[in-house]
Image (cartoon, grey):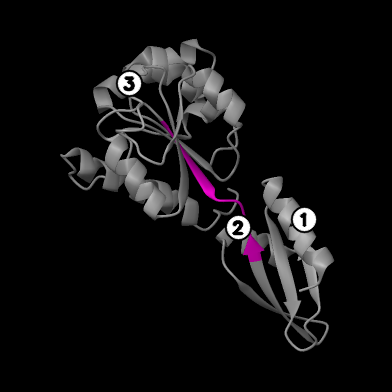
Amino acid sequence: MKRATLERLLASARAQQPVVLATDLESGEQRVLEAGEGEAAADALRRDACVHLEEGGRQWFLRPWSPPVRMVLVGAVHIAQPLAAMAALAEYAVTIVDPRRAFATPERFPGVTLLGDWPDQALAALVPDARTAVVTLTHDPKLDDPALVVALRSPAFYVGALGSRKSHAARLERLRALGLTDAELARLHAPVGLAIGARSPAEIAVSILAEVTQQLRRPPQPAA
């Protein structure tokens, strides 16, 4: 790999910018492509998978270089403990947001980034993008609702909220009162997680991580 190519990849990583490394399988020539530079590059980034491409009689191997997928958990609650650990094993970069300092401690969440700001302020600073999932877990509207407003107005690929169907109906009314549109509310996964009959915190964490990953890996749906 040429030094200029390596420096371009490192610069993209520092900027959290996903790119594709294209290698000519015969000559070894390499190019760094962005998402807008061809459908094959966009496809590799969208699927987060390598792509083999034949173009102009040349065979190319396209490898995506993407920043880690982020998972932001609002609420340092019991469910957050197994969920943070499982998500880290699945190579999500996990951040926990909770202004309640007694809950968000390094002892309860070793090795996890902890933010003690109010959730809406933390989310605004984190700038959720298309490789970010946001899950609210506190059951407290003062903490969950402001975070959901920021997340649902962002490009985050997944936004979910813990709670029963009854509490979700009340949540929707509160969020409408805060100015969210029906289209924005339609993006919200609630009750959060796949319906697997989960009961314990660990089982609920499994259901949440499964649904987040399903949304991440799901092929793009054709426009209606």
Is 72 magenta? The answer is yes
**As drawn, 83 above or below 135:** below
The secondary structure type at the circle numbered 1 is loop
Name the residue carrying label 3: 169
Is 94 magenta? The answer is no
- Could you tell me residue 198's position as x and y percent? 19, 43
Q: Is residue 219 left or right of residue 75?
A: right
Dot label at residue 36: 1
For the record, the magenta segment spans 64-73
Q: CA distance from mark 3 to mark 1?
A: 40 Å
The secondary structure type at the circle numbered 2 is helix
Q: CA distance from mark 2 to mark 3?
A: 33 Å
Name the residue carrying label 2: 46
Q: Is residue 17 visible?
A: no
Q: Is residue 143 left or right of residue 138?
A: right
Q: Mark 1: which amino acid?
A: Gly
Q: Relative to the observer, which residue lies in front, 220 or 108?
A: 108
- Could you tell me residue 148's position as x and y percent? 47, 24
Quarter-wise, where is residue 96 in the image?
Answer: top left
Q: Is residue 224 visible?
A: yes
Q: CA distance from mark 2 to mark 1?
A: 12 Å
Q: Name the N-terminal-most of marks 3 and 1.
A: 1
- Could you tell me residue 52's position as x and y percent? 65, 78
Q: Mark 2 near mark 1, Cβ–Cβ under 8 Å?
A: no
**As drawn, 150 above or below 25:** above
**As drawn, 139 above or below 5:** above
Total tally of numbered discs in the picture: 3
